[in-house]
Image (cartoon, rainbow, N blue to C red):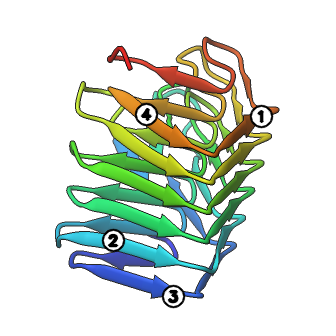
Amino acid sequence: GGAGLYAAAAVTLTNVAVYSNTAKISSGGNLAGGGLYATSGTTVRLTGGVVSNNVVSSTHATLLIAAQGGGLYVNGVNLIISGTSIISNALRSSTLSSGGGLYLDGGYVLHLTNVEVLSNTSSGGAGGVAVNTSNILGHAILTNTRIMSNTALGTSGGGGLAVGKSVTATGCLIQYNRSVGTGGGLAAVNGSN
């Protein structure tokens, strides 16, 4: 993963464009992070800038390959994003895929403040944003954020946003998202809040 950027330490990006990167896989396994793949460290922080037109794709005809985080994939750290646009990123793989715009894994917290998540697509669930959808640890805190016109083509749901446990949203707009499965706008897949 990480066709654009790969990091195994704390990351801070300010007014950076992560644009038009493609990560591909042709055999079995998982693939993540078309624009940015970050693991370890303590925090990944994005301020301003844009994450746009990044793609994670599988070229294997028969294997079910789980692609995650078309724009961003972050594992094992908190993810704090402020004033950034996450636009037109895509996962083009199996219905096991999740997080067309971004995927946060590993039981940490996603903070989005004044962020736009627009027109991202997933061949599986969570067209815009996925937070720990495979367990009960995923939590997202959203403030003044727009999650709009994202699409999840798989049956696992969450056209705009899918989280493993809970979401706290203040002053947000979640609109015009589409899911073949449940939760066109939002799916809390393992939790109750």
Give how far across and how far down residue 183 sits, in percent: 62, 17
Mark 2 and mark 3: Cα distance apart in space:
11 Å
Q: Earlier in the sequence, mark 1 or mark 3?
A: 3
Front position among marks 4 and 3 = 4
For the residues labelled 4 and 2, say whether their Cβ atoms are less than 8 Å apart. no
For the residues labelled 2 and 3, say whether their Cβ atoms are less than 8 Å apart. no
Query: Residue at the location (46% across, 69% down)?
Result: 36
Write down the residue under mark 2: 44
Query: Residue at the location (50% across, 57% down)?
Result: 112
Q: In this rendered view, identify the residue nearer to me: 147 or 127.
A: 147
Write down the residue under mark 1: 175
Mark 1 and mark 2: Cα distance apart in space:
27 Å
Quarter of the picture holding the C terminus: top left
Mark 1 and mark 3: Cα distance apart in space:
27 Å
Q: Secondary structure at mark 2?
A: strand
Write down the residue under mark 4: 167
Q: Amino acid at mark 4?
A: Val
Q: Earlier in the sequence, mark 4 or mark 2?
A: 2
Lateral position of residue 161 relative to residue 7, left or right: right
